[in-house]
Each structure stands twice: as C-alpha cells, then as structure tokens.
Image: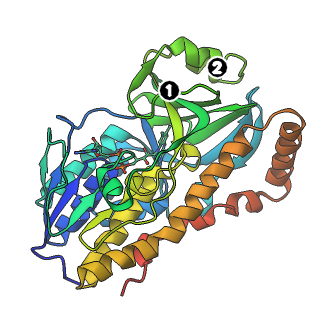
Amino acid sequence: MGHLTHRDITIIGAGVAGLTVAAALAQRGAHVRVLERADALREVGAGLQISPNAGRVLEALGLSAPLDAVSVRSEGVVLHDSHGRQVAAMPLARRRPDAAFRLIHRARLIELLERAARDAGAEITLDSPVTDLPDAPLLIGADGLHSRVRAALNGPQTPFFTGQTAWRALIPDGAADPFARVFMGPGRHLVSYPLGAGLRNIVGVMERPDWTAEGWSHEDDPDHLRAAFGRFGGPVPGWLAQLQRVGVWGLFRHPIAARWQDGRRVILGDAVHPTLPFMAQGAVMAIEDAWVLTECLDRIADQAAALARYQAARAPRVARVVAAANANARNYHLSGPQRLIGHAGLRAISRLAPGVLLGKFDWIYDYDPLAERIS
Ligand SMILES: Cc1cc2nc3c(=O)[nH]c(=O)nc-3n(C[C@H](O)[C@H](O)[C@H](O)COP(=O)(O)OP(=O)(O)OC[C@H]3O[C@@H](n4cnc5c(N)ncnc54)[C@H](O)[C@@H]3O)c2cc1C
C-alpha cells in the first residue's frame, strides 16, 4: 500500500465514476485534477438504485451517514403484471440485514461525491471540455458513453440501437413504500420507486422500431409516456397522471471495450461497459471500478502492471452483469403464451421456493469490492 502518495492524476469526467475515483485516489494522497465539460454539476438524470456491492465502497469513502440522510432504504423488488397484480416479491434487504439497498436521486449522489472529492483535496474544474487528450502521467477516462479515452484506446466503435426507448421522470409522492416496483407488460415495462424528499422515480421502457438519440437530456411530451402505459393498472395510472417533465432516449448497446488501458491511460464506468438499465447496475459498476482501480494503483508500484491488474480483476464481473441486464430485457417484456407461462412460473417459484428467486442475484449484491485481493 501507499504507491498513490503525491502521484499526479488527471481524470476526464465528473459523473459517478469520475467523482468516486477522484475521492478514492485523493483520500490515498494522490494529487487529483478532474476536468468536466459541464459548467455546473446539474440535476442530470433521476433516480438510482445503489445496491450493497457499491454501498460498501461509498461507506469506505466515509459517506455512510450523509448517504443515509439523502436516500431511502429499499427493502427489495416486487414484480407485477401490467394489471398491477403481484407476480413475485424479492425482499432483498431481509436476506442481508447488515447491507443497505439505497434509492437516491442522482444529483444528491453527485453532490456527496463532489464534496468527498474536494474535501480530500481533489481539484475539480467545470466548463472544461477535453478535445485533445492531455499528456498526463496517468489519465483516467471517466467520460461516459461517448468516451474520447475509450476511442483513443480502441478506435471508433458504432453502438447499435436495441429497439428500446426509455423515459425517465420524477413525480411528487410522499408514500413511504420501501420497494422498487416493476410492472411488466408485452413489449414494455415500468419501474418505480420512492426517492425521499417527496419524490418518486418513474422509468418506462418500450420496444419500438424508431429511435431517439442516445443521451440523458432529451425532453418528450408526457402524453407519449402516458399513451405507452395507458393500459397498465394498479398505481400506474395515478402516477402517470402527475407527469410534468419527461426525459426520453434510445437504449443503445455498446460492446464492452476490449482495451481498458495502455499503461498511461485507463477507462472506467460507462466509458468501458455501458449497460442496459435492467439490473440497475450501471452506476454501481462504475463505483466498484473506481475502488478496484484505486486499490491496484495503491498496491502495485508499477503503473502498467497496476492498470493491467485492474482490467483483469474487473472484466469478468462486468461482462456477467451486462449479460444479466440483457437477459432481464427479454424476461420483462414477454408477450402472449410465453408471458402467461413466465408469470405463472415466477408466481409459483415465489410462493413455493422464494429462496431460489431471491438467491439468483446474490453474486451481484454480495460481492465486496473491498475484499478484492490485489497483489
Ligand atoms: C433509465 C436508466 C436507469 C438507470 N438506473 C440505474 C440504477 O438504478 N442504478 C445504477 O447503478 N445505474 C443506473 N443507470 C446507469 C447509470 O446512470 C450510468 O451507468 C452511470 O451514470 C455511468 O456513470 P459514468 O460516470 O461512467 O458516466 P456519466 O454519468 O455519463 O459521466 C460522464 C461525465 O463525463 C463528462 N464528459 C464526457 N466527455 C467529456 C469531455 N470530453 N470533457 C470533459 N468532460 C466530459 C460528462 O459531462 C459527464 O459528467 C441507469 C441508466 C439509465 C439509462
């Protein structure tokens, strides 16, 4: 340990990945500079589910109490059909009482991470779009979906449209329902959970052949989201009636980058492995990456060896998580007889052998990045 002290490190991007790695590196004594193109760290995005595998990292960065102050503790996930009837319940938190599943507004998480990074001495410069990659002893690309650092390492790559469009919205809601709820209909699903501070997060995903641009901040007419889920029952109509501002974007698949580093430049988060949102693990994997990258740089003196070790430690896990998210896209959108059979099967498993369903993703949530053996 201790190879980070006084190292000069430049990070491009002040999203979840960039700010987490900035905080982690600066806390170990590195001189960290973050360049962010936005002129303010705005209210971009909406809700995030932060499962314990990332929570362990945030807690190790000293953020446990501030996180608890601005997030809601989730008890798990409940699957419903489009009429609102319960198909299966996964009380994930009851299975691991010592671990926190948190629901948080992305902007609140960004604020906490920014403060942690600055408190540890990181210098964050806004309004600094990077066009030519700076020549730095170590350059970290946390620059998201259209990463320049990824392109420099791997050449240009064209993502493909998945045939799915996502809407994201926040509505006012004071209900203290501690579950993320998924409503599954043919070719579409809607996810909702509370964010605290009187807000509820709504994500609707629908298969359709045309696409909207990839990105975070395209506004859409709320009536489009209402129409897409107009036949849904349960609490959904009441939620949709409250929509005011709605963001929309196409969901694209990018392959996981083949080359994560070249000894001087390295990428993490969406820059390496953008994922479909159906396991709610994109930001979570970025946080895991940030910890493991920091550990490798701190424990291994030779920078090239440290970066290679980081890729070796992370690549198998992120590939498995991305594949699980792809599979969920299919499971949520079943139609016709497949849907009846699928939902009946889930209901039966949930009733007769709840542990089977609950345990399916233990490998995701019980992973502890802090226990990763780096040498
Ligand atoms: C519908 C939906 C729901 C989701 N729900 C969840 C969830 O519940 N849980 C979860 O874990 N994840 C979720 N995600 C995924 C998650 O939001 C992303 O995986 C995560 O935000 C990626 O973080 P990042 O820091 O890698 O990239 P970003 O957040 O995209 O940050 C990249 C940063 O780099 C900056 N930047 C880019 N290029 C440059 C440049 N040239 N110069 C300077 N700055 C630059 C950008 O301005 C930005 O600030 C969801 C995603 C979607 C689409």
**Picture coordinates of residue 238 (x, y %)?**
60, 17
Instruction: Report the residue marked by disc 2.
Output: 228
Which numbered tag is attached to residue 317? none
Query: In front: mark 1 or mark 2?
Result: 1
Residue 345 appears in the picture as rendered: yes
Q: Tell me where residue 138 sits by quadrant.
A: bottom left
Asked whether 178 or 39 is in front, the reply is 39
Q: Is residue 13 left or right of residue 223?
A: left
Residue drawn at x 26%, y 53% as measured from the top left: 19
**Colour theme:** rainbow
Q: Is residue 258 left or right of residue 16?
A: right
Residue drawn at x 48%, y 25% as measured from the top left: 173
Q: Is residue 259 left or right of residue 191?
A: left
- Crowding at label 2, few (<14), some or many (≥20) Cα neighbours within 10 Å? some
Relative to residue 26, is residue 74 depicted above or below? above
Tell me the kind of residue under disc 2: Ala
- Crowding at label 1, few (<14), some or many (≥20) Cα neighbours within 10 Å? some
Residue 367 appears in the picture as rendered: no
Quadrant where the image shows the N terminus: bottom left
**Picture coordinates of residue 21 (x, y %)?**
27, 61
Tell me the kind of residue under disc 1: Thr
**Picture coordinates of residue 193 (x, y %)?**
53, 36
Q: CA distance from mark 1 to mark 2?
A: 15 Å
**Picture coordinates of residue 126 (x, y %)?**
14, 41
Asked whether 260 or 298 is in front, the reply is 260
Instruction: Report the residue marked by disc 1.
Output: 212
Q: Secondary structure at mark 2?
A: helix
**Residue furthest bottom in the image:** 375
